[in-house]
Structure formats: C-alpha cells, structure tokens
Image (cartoon, rainbow, N blue to C red):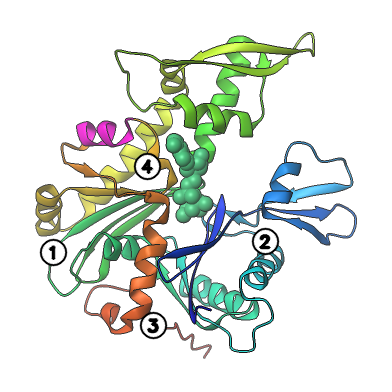
Amino acid sequence: MPTDIVIDMGSKKTVLYSNNRVLLMQPSVVTVDADTGEPLYFGDKAFLTVGRTPDTLTPVFPIAHGVIADYDIAESMLKTYMEKVFGNRVVKPRAIITLPSGLTEMQHHSVSDLAESAGGRNASTIESSLACALAVGIDFKKPQGAMIIDIGAGVTDVATISMGGISQCSNINIAGNDFDQSIVKYVKRKYKILIGTATAEKIKIAIGSATRHEFEIALTAKGRHISSGLPTTFEMTSLEIYDAIKDQLSEIFNGIKKVLQNTPPDIVGDIMNTGIYLTGGSAKLRGLDEYLQRALGTKVIVPEKPELTAVKGAALALKQPGLLKNNDFFYRSVQKLKIDLE
Ligand SMILES: Nc1ncnc2c1ncn2[C@@H]1O[C@H](COP(=O)(O)OP(=O)(O)OP(=O)(O)O)[C@@H](O)[C@H]1O
Ligand SMILES: [Mg+2]
C-alpha cells in the first residue's frame, strides 16, 4: 500500500498516482440531489448522467478552470476516491496536490486543507508547470530556462521556469472543454443539428485537428435535428473541426506570446534552444504541436502520455522536497504554505 500520493483534481478528471502507477482516474463530476444538494454518484457513474439527468438530479463539476469551484462537493468527491484506493487505513498517505500556476497562497492553503480532510497527511501543493518541468528532466539546480504549456480541459497553464521557480505565468481559460463547446455550436449553426458536449469530445478526439491538412478525415456522427426534433446522422471532417476551434487556438497562442514577452531574455534564449514542452490531455489534439511550433518558431515537445506529466513530476517532487526551496525572484515552493493571519 503506498505511503505517498499525488492528487491531481483537474477540470475533467481526478487522478490519484503513486509509485509510477495510476491508482485511480475518474471524471471530476458528482451527481447531487437537486433538492437537498446531497452527493449521490461520483466519477464514471456521475458522468453517465451528464446531459441525461431528470430534474431531481444535478451533475456538478466541482473543479472549474483548474480551481475549486465548489469546495464541499470537491471534498466529498476526493474523500470517496481516497477511500476507494486506501479503504479505511489508519496511517494516512502523505499527499501532494498539483495546481495551476499563479494561484494565491490562500488557494494553495485551502486545497491542502481539503486534501487532509479527504484522507491525506502533511498535504503540500505544487504548480503543475513546475511538476511537468521536473517530469521532463529539467535540472532545477541549473539556471536553465524552460517553458511548459499545459492544455487540459478547463485551463491552459503557461509558465516559464528557471532554477526550480516560475518566472512568468498565465492561466488562459480556454482549453479542451471550450473546443468541445465550439464543435457543438458549429454543428448547430452549419447543420442545424444538436449534439451534446460528450459527442463533440468524441468527434474531437477521433478526427480533431489544429492544422489544415492536405488529407482530411471524415466521420459520421449522430445528433438531433433542430426543426424536426428527430435523430439524424451527419458527416464531419477534420477541416471543419479546425474551423470550429481555430479562433480559440489563436487566443491560446496570444496568451503564450504574452508570457514569452514578459520573460527575461536569457530565459527566452534557453527556451528557443531547447524547445517548449506541451503537456495536458489536449496536447494530444492532432497537429497542435505543429501549429504552436510554426506560430512560435520554436521546437515543441510533447512527452509520452502528456495528461500524466504533472502527476509524474509531482511524485518526483514529493521524493525530493528540498528541490524547490528557492530563491530570489521565484515566489512559490513545494513546502507546505503557512499563512500568517495577523
Ligand atoms: N486525443 C485527444 N485529442 C484531443 N483532445 C484530447 C485527446 N485526449 C484527451 N483530450 C482532451 O484533453 C482534455 C483533458 O485533459 P486533462 O486530463 O489534462 O485535463 P484536466 O487536468 O482534467 O483539466 P485542467 O487541467 O484543465 O483542469 C479533455 O478536454 C479531453 O477532451
Ligand atoms: Mg490538469
């Protein structure tokens, strides 16, 4: 039984990770009783109810844009997941939680509290960008600049890093969920057909593209016609997905550009030499690395299983707690944050 645990509560999925293994991966969603607010179903079971709930049930996504939007529901969700993995074990696991960059100390503190009340011990926090940098092998003892772009479901977290600290960062509230919603809108506008976000996500994963490719892929999907209200099928191509999401891609690009513009030139120089790391589940969108590579004029590297890069790095940080104890201009570390209320 593991004694250490990495917790990643993302907008889409929650991961519990230890000893190079995913112990649990479940959607970050809870179905609650609409009258009493009592949580009824968690994770996979709750996800099945999304878009299908009767009026008496409400699906709640307690994490929005990478941060806790509903503390109580997030706590009961994490508690349920921790119990699934650890049962009622007496000795609690030491916990580290990944968070987007640039949050306040109060937010770090409240997430640590939540993890402890959900069954973790000595909870500390780490920014996903620093965790990802560790996972891809950036040496925190050297003044070597790096850039991490983590595109998840609810947030794109962009950070430049040197010597174990964050130089510049920005959270752009556009990511995979927004691509799904754009596909829903596109299909409604162009074909007058209604689809849910779950179908849109499936289409995106199957044929989605961040570039105009010479060869298009097409897929037939099911929806409901707006005027007749009847089920119908339609064909969609990868080029259409590109059209649906291209404005959002350029907003993400603009956000990345701003972070680079505010980063000291020496760090930017290092980044140009070594390349930019692209992580998060949306890094798997076909051609996204190519799109960013062209737009930024710098090599873009996607690690294997980019949706797990942050948890892998956080596990390394938990083993070497001294690593992030830095230093002049960096403002956050893996140490447990203390808040002086006076
Ligand atoms: N092959 C794929 N192509 C495109 N998108 C993908 C693919 N696989 C997963 N995704 C998208 O990745 C997103 C989930 O990524 P991830 O697991 O990193 O999110 P998260 O950590 O839960 O969210 P966040 O970090 O934004 O809070 C979803 O929007 C999903 O649709
Ligand atoms: Mg994430």
Please indicate whether residue 36 sits to the left or right of residue 178 in the image: right
Q: Residue furthest front?
A: 1
Disc 2 residue crowd, few under 14, some 14–19, many 20+, Cα 10 Å? few
Q: Residues within 10 Å of mark 4 (few under 14, many from 20)?
A: many
Alpha carbon separation for disc pair 2 and 3: 25 Å
Q: Main secondary structure of the magenta part?
A: helix
Residue that carries the numbered disc 4 in the rendered image = 283
Q: Is residue 224 left or right of residue 137?
A: right
- Check disc 2 and report the residue beneath it: 70
Between disc 3 and disc 4, the foreground one is 4
Region rendered in magenta: 287-295
Q: Earlier in the sequence, mark 1 or mark 4?
A: 1
In terms of image quadrants, where is residue 208? top left
Kindly identify which residue carries mark 3: 335
Residue appearing at x 89%, y 60% in the figure: 36
The x, y position of residue 338, in whole percent, is 46, 86
Residue closer to the observer: 264 or 208: 208
Q: Nearer the viewer, mark 2 or mark 4?
A: 4
Give the mark, 3 or 1, whose residue is nearer the N terminus: 1
**Mark 2 vs mark 4, CA separation in Å:** 27 Å
Q: Label 4 amino acid?
A: Ala
> Can you identify the residue that label 1 sits on?
144
Q: Please rate how many residues cluster around mark 1, counting C-alpha atoms within 10 Å: few if below 14, some from 14 to 19, many from 20.
A: some
Helix, strand or loop status at disc 4: helix
Query: What amino acid type should be assigned to the residue bearing mark 2?
Result: Asp
- Magenta segment: does it hold 325? no
